[in-house]
Each structure stands twice: as structure tokens, then as C-alpha cells.
Image (cartoon, rainbow, N blue to C red):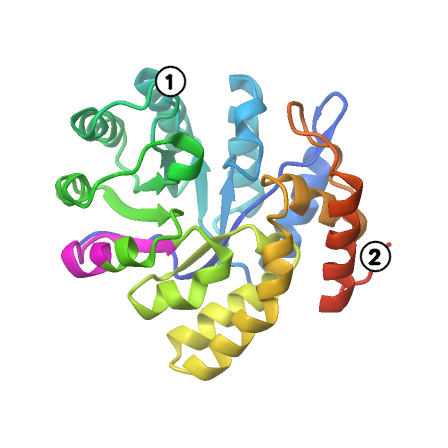
Amino acid sequence: MKKTLFTGSGVAIVTPFTKDGIDFEKLGELIEWHIASKTDAIIICGTTGEASTMPDPEHKAAIAYAVEKTAGRIPVIAGTGSNDTRHAIELSVYAQDCGADGILVVTPYYNKTTQKGLYYHYREIAGSVHIPVVIYNVPSRTGLCVSIETLGELASIENITAIKEASGDLVYLSRIAAEIPDLDIYSGNDDIIIPAMSVGALGVISVAANIIPVQIHDMCRLYLDGDTKAAAALQLKTLDLIRKLFIEVNPVPIKTAMNLLGFGVGDLRMPLCEMESGNLEILKKALTDYGLALK
């Protein structure tokens, strides 16, 4: 029996930065707030955490800190993906050794590879660790989609337990649920959490949970408890805000929103930069329309 890492809302947590590096004190505050706000898992060093701008010592330090700070209260899933299989193995082994509950491994980008190469890539990474591996399928960023056939082959590997599915394609997601029932599914898109759960997803790895963690958790919990009408109502209530959180490339709007709301998570790292002024005003209006108070 494969191990389910979590059900409900896992936050793809931002990484707060100072000009000198990670603001660990602020990261600790965010983790404590998420635990108090019913977040079901912490995903550290993902896309939203700007892991692609972190040198290895910093990347590893963020993972170790999240594990230590969370102290087993909720699962920690570490982003360890790379387009270099050896590098992904190094980060994955480190994450396991410092106590992460699982790893999130994005499909290789830029050099991309074939479906056969994808199978070899994930097989080698999974074979280097014993903790659960979550495949991260996000073709809009990587230019590569894992085929249903390749997913089926990968699901036969014992510790490949789940997929974060961020293509936005509900037919593809439905096929995973129908054809690969032993692979847990997490929506990678906040705007289709309930549609994804309606065909078998266990929850979401969420960007919006960085600012509305209770609502994202409650949406998932309501659905899992059978109150589909209330869950759908929450999905629809959050929809405009979620759409505006992706008005520019993630994590530009979410980190901007957190600073507007007083979280003080610092600047984005280049090549990401401040929002266009018109989009910033749209984001501010979406936050206030939702009922969030700007600082």
C-alpha cells in the first residue's frame, strides 16, 4: 500500500528574502501561521518559493529549516527537481536525510527529454530515496507533459506515490484517476480545485493558500466530508481573487499581495521584478473586493 502524503491544502510557500539571503525568522512565522490556519502540508522550495534562484547551500538550508520548524506537526514536501538527474538525486537525498516527508520533482525543463528519458529520470531519483516522490507536471513552464502511458509505468515504482497536476487539463487529470488509481492526485491549479477533486484529486498544492489558507483548507475539507455544494460555493467565491493572483507570472502577484497585506516577505529575485502598475491596481482591487485589508 502506497503512503498518502496528505489530503486537503498544501501550501506552495513563498520564500521570504532579505538582500542578504533567506529571512528565516519570517519563514518561521509563516510556517507557524500556516499550521495555526489549518494548512495540511508545507511545500518548500517549489516554483512559488523561487527555488530556481537558490544556490544549493541556500536551497538545502531552506529545506532543513522547514523540516526543523514544522517539527512533524504537518508534512513537509521538498522541491528537489532539476533538469540534471544527478543534481535532482543530490537534492532528494539531502531532503530525505534531513527529514522531509516527501519530495516534489518537476519534469526536466529546457533539455526536456523523451518519454523514455522521463521514465529513466524519475526511476533514478525514486531509486535514490525511500520517501514518497510527487511528480510535478507543469507543461506551461517546462514544455514537457508526462504521458498517461509513462505515468502508468512510473506508478509501478513503489515510492512514486502522487502527481501535482498543473496542466489545467481536466480530461488528462480524469484519465489519471481512471487509469492509474494507485497514483494520488493533487491539483496544481487553484482555480479548479473542486473540479479536480470531483474526479479524484485529494486536494491541492496551492499558491492562494499563502494568503487565504483557512479558505483553501475548508474548501478541500468540505468536499472530502461530502458537502460538495458548500465546497463549490467556496471555489466560486475565491475564483476572481485566484485569477488575479496569476495576472502575471507566479510568484510575482502572490508575493506582491503578501507584502500589500503586511506579511513583509521581501523582494522577488531577478529575473522576476515588480508588477506592471496597471496589474498592481487590479491586484489591489481583487484583494480588497475579497475582504482582505491592505496595510
Which residue sits furthest front? Answer: 278
Above or below: residue 48 compared with residue 91: below
Q: Which region is colored magenta?
A: 175-186
Q: Position of residue 200 (x, y in %)?
A: 29, 65
Q: Position of residue 22 (x, y in %)?
A: 67, 29
The residue under the point 34% across, 26% down is 108
Residue 294: image tag = 2
Name which of mark 2 and mark 1 comes first in the sequence. Answer: 1
Q: Position of residue 47 (x, y in %)?
A: 51, 36
Report the label total.
2
Q: Amino acid at mark 2?
A: Leu
Rendered image quadrant of residue 201: bottom left
Where 30 falls versus 59 (above or below)?
below
Residue 125: % across, % down = 27, 27
Against 196, residue 124 (above or below) is above
Looking at the rendering, in which quadrant would you find the C terminus? bottom right
Q: Which residue is mark 1?
A: 87
